[in-house]
Image (cartoon, grey):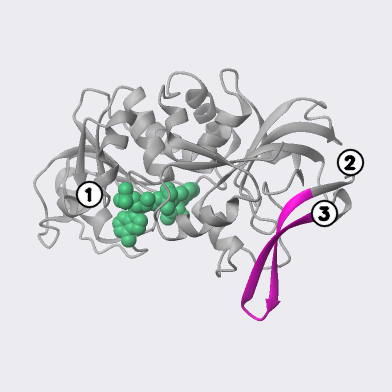
Amino acid sequence: MTAQSFRALIVEETAPKVFSRRIGNRTIDDLPPGELLIKVHYSSLNYKDALSATGRPGVTRNYPHTPGIDAAGEVVTCADGAFVPGERVIVTGHDLGMDTAGGFGQYIRIPSTWAIRLPQGLELQESMIFGTAGFTAGLSTWQLSRSGIEPGDGEVLVTGASGGVGSIAVAVLAQAGYRVVAATGKEQEKEYLLSLGATQVIGRDEVIAGVERPLMKERWRGVVDVVGGTTLAAAVKSTSYGGTVTCCGLVGSAELPLNVYPFILRGVRLIGIDSVQCPREPRQTVWEMLAGPWKPAALAKTATECTLQELEGKIHTILKGELRGRAVINLT
Ligand code: NDP
């Protein structure tokens, strides 16, 4: 392999709406234009990557394509001088891995504005244990904290807790001092969630019990929700006076069957979380918190590492909602 040629996951549309995946060679010249060329050391698997890798609508329009919405590595060249060769950087979100060749290849070329320097306190591999899922968990924690929800105020609920965003949210919130209640559909993940720092683990059904009522008993000071639908509605209805709920996902449903009572009678706040176009300043702030005071002691426990060749199985696992924590891809 020359420096111009590198390994990547290549997704092709072999017939209309029929997609296949293979590990193959690409060249630097195949990459889109951009100021910043990065040698990728690690990437990670997110739900969106699995959608892109299997040709599901709404993520990637043009194939052949290399997915991977996250990448961490070393700057090779930077045409506008924003970075110097050898600097270690993280890229998450923007168009990476959507219609721009992504982190499931050993090189990416992107606009320099998409990258941030690896903060002190984090290794490249650790930054990809976080990846977009961890950054989203960090943004959610940051929004709870900015809205005045303090550790010690009461319980914070995390839904979809054994998944990527959920696992890291449990660990980050616990590290930040919050009392975390983890809601999961998987009884067998109880010990894992306790080991990440949850003080209590409850079943999905417990979250939604009584959701048909206009308001539910006040329980949560804060909520990090990845599920949407009835789960999010129940979470909002059972948040205590002045509490905050963050919403980032739709694994249950994109619908929100809710009324206005929690907002107008309890002053509950519902905050949307977007990791993709999140501006540079909060992006940097959240990454610094993740590298510092919020870096969970249990971070490594949330991760399994795999190679590009081993990714295929993980793609199917995450699509079934069965992936525990985070899958990190080693491209070195
Ligand atoms: P994962 O698949 O890793 O985790 C989702 C978890 O949700 C599962 O592990 C499962 O956990 C639970 N779950 C799955 N299906 C259902 C269901 N039908 N009803 C209730 N719970 C369910 O995904 P991620 O954590 O990577 O992503 C979670 C969501 O967040 C996705 O919708 C994703 O698109 C979104 N997201 C949004 C971002 C943003 O910027 N807004 C960024 C990153 C992700 P358990 O069994 O423990 O309940």
The quadrant of the picture occupied by the C terminus is: top right
Query: Where is mark 1, residue-wise?
Result: 235
Q: CA distance from mark 1 to mark 2?
A: 51 Å
- Depth-wise, is mark 1 or mark 2 nearer the camera? 2
Amino acid type of disc 2? Ala
Q: Quadrant of residue 35?
A: top right
Name the residue that disc number 2 marks.
3
Q: Which residue is mark 3?
A: 26
Q: Is residue 228 visible?
A: no
Give the mark toward the camera: 1 or 3.
Answer: 3
* Inter-mark Cα distance, 3 to 2: 11 Å
Of the two numbered discs 3 and 2 on the same chain, state the one appearing first in sequence: 2
* Residue range (magenta): 7-26
What residue sits 44% from the left and 34% below the top?
Answer: 138
Q: Position of residue 9 (x, y in %)?
A: 70, 55
Whether residue 250 can be seen here:
yes
- Contact, CB < 8 Å: mark 3 with mark 2? no
At x 83% / y 50%, what residue is drawn? 33
